[in-house]
């Protein structure tokens, strides 16, 4: 939340946070490809319903799941991808930033700050385009804006049984 706020975002208004895997694997291990594939349709449906202008892929698992990008995140972080008219940007995962606290130029935290400045600029650009088109843009009491979605959201419940034995209740 700190970097979002520093970049001028209100996490309670401007941001929707989700995860690729809805239940963390045991012993905090990385999710398997089977687990990532299982939850991908669920995540894509969330994105469709929320209808964000920008999706940030925080870390390699979300980057690989949503962008099918196989290069390392250090090589592609900060780059824009457009998929089905929506913008995506891979950024370092917050846990990685906590393990790499240096703010020295070229280090993960300073690179992330540059990424978030670019994200903020793109958000403002898209907000202005939406306003010019007469689209719906929500404004909070502080004059900040957020995307409210297209208004065509339909609630759809998908019952899923995870095939992963690790995820049994």
Image (tube, helix red, strand yellow):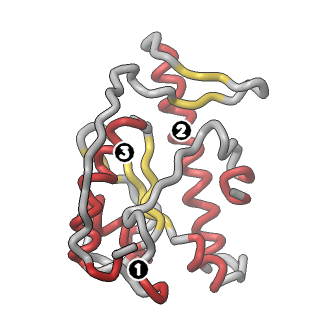
Residue at position x 23%, y 65% in the image:
38
Residue at position x 59%, y 22% in the image:
138
Number of the front mark, 3 or 1: 1
Measured from the top left, where is residue 90 in percent x and y? 42, 62
| Badge 3 or badge 1: first in the primary sequence | 1
Q: Residue furthest right?
A: 142
Question: Mark 2 falls on what kind of element?
Answer: helix
In the rendered image, which quarter is residue 139 located in? top right
Residues at marks 2 and 1, CA–CA distance in whole angstroms: 33 Å
Q: Give me the disc on residue 25.
A: 1
Residue at position x 60%, y 39% in the image:
14
List the residue tagged with mark 2. 123
Q: Give me the disc on residue 46.
A: 3
Above or below: residue 28 compared with residue 62: below
Measured from the top left, where is residue 140 in percent x and y? 70, 26
| Quadrant the N terminus occupies | bottom right
Above or below: residue 28 compared with residue 127: below
Residues at marks 3 and 2, CA–CA distance in whole angstroms: 20 Å
């Amino acid at each position: 939340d700190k970097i979002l706020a520093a970049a001028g975002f209100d996490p309670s208004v401007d941001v929707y946070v989700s995860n690729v895997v809805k239940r963390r694997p045991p012993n905090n291990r990385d999710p398997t490809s089977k687990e990532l594939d299982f939850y991908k349709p669920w995540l894509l449906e969330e994105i469709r319903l929320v209808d964000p202008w920008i999706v940030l892929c925080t870390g390699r698992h979300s980057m690989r799941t949503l962008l099918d990008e196989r290069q390392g995140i250090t090589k592609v972080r900060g780059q824009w991808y457009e998929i089905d008219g929506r913008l995506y940007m891979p950024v370092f995962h917050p846990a990685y930033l906590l393990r790499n606290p240096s703010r020295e130029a070229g280090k993960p935290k300073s690179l992330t700050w540059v990424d978030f400045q670019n994200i903020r600029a793109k958000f403002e650009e898209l907000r202005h385009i939406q306003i010019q088109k007469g689209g719906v843009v929500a404004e909070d009491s502080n004059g900040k804006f957020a995307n409210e979605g297209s208004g065509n959201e339909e609630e759809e419940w998908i019952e899923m049984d995870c095939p992963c034995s690790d995820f049994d209740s």
